[in-house]
């Protein structure tokens, strides 16, 4: 059984892709210049390499964002434990990060 199409999720995913560098205009430009007869045309192989490069840059950016979110969560947990005079338990933070709580919107 297929799930109904979630337009909001789709829009969010497309927005995320654009934020990571998969911008319509950039990819369109690469595609238009692939095998072009114009002087500024590029080969299909070069077009593929350029699109791969966009993907690698997007992965690097996503990893950096994730790392920043994890560090921010850990710092917040350490501050919270210090304010409440609790012993800092790393496993608590690790479990929260595994659940994705470090990526939830701040209230």
Image (spheres, rainbow, N blue to C red):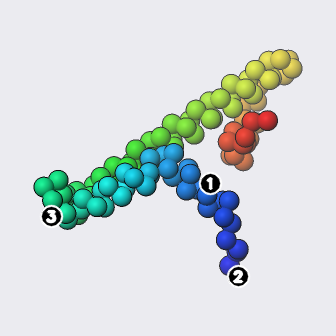
Residue on which the image places disc 2: 1
* Front residue of this view, candidates 18 and 87: 18
> Camera-side residue: 81 or 103?
103
Q: Nearer the viewer, residue 18 or 103?
A: 18
Q: Which mark is residue 12?
A: 1
Q: Earlier in the sequence, mark 1 or mark 3?
A: 1
Q: State left or right for residue 46 relative to residue 62.
A: left
Q: Quadrant of residue 9?
A: bottom right
Q: Position of residue 65 (x, y in %)?
A: 55, 37
The residue mark sitting in front, 1 or 2, is 1
Q: Is residue 15 left or right of residue 8?
A: left
Indicate the position of residue 83 as horizontal and vertical percent values: 83, 17
- Answer left or right for 93 relative to 13: right
Q: Quadrant of residue 48?
A: bottom left
Element at label 1: helix
Q: Is residue 87 left or right of residue 63?
A: right
Residue pictured at 70% horizontal, 82% vertical: 1
Task: Tell me the CA gap for discs 1 and 2.
Answer: 24 Å
Element under label 3?
loop
Where does label 3 land, which residue? 37
Q: How many marks?
A: 3
Q: CA distance from mark 2 to mark 3?
A: 47 Å
Seen at 51% across and 36% down, the residue is 64
Q: Is residue 3 above or below residue 70?
A: below
Q: In this picture, is 81 found above or below 18? A: above
Residue contact at pointers 2 and 3, CB within 8 angstroms: no
Q: Residue visible at 80% across and 23% down?
A: 80
**Tag 2 secondary structure:** loop
| N-terminal label among 1 and 2 | 2
Question: Residue placed farthest to the front in the image?
Answer: 38
């Amino acid at each position: 059984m297929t799930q109904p199409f979630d337009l909001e999720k789709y829009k969010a995913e497309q927005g995320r892709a654009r934020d990571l560098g998969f911008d319509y205009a950039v990819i369109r430009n690469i595609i238009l210049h692939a095998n072009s007869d114009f002087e500024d045309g590029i080969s299909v192989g070069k077009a593929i390499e350029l699109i791969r490069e966009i993907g690698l840059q997007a992965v690097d950016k996503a990893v950096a964002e994730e790392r920043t979110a994890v560090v921010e969560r850990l710092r917040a947990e350490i501050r919270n434990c210090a304010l409440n005079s609790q012993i800092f338990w790393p496993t608590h933070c690790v479990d929260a990060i595994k659940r994705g709580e470090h990526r939830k919107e701040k209230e």
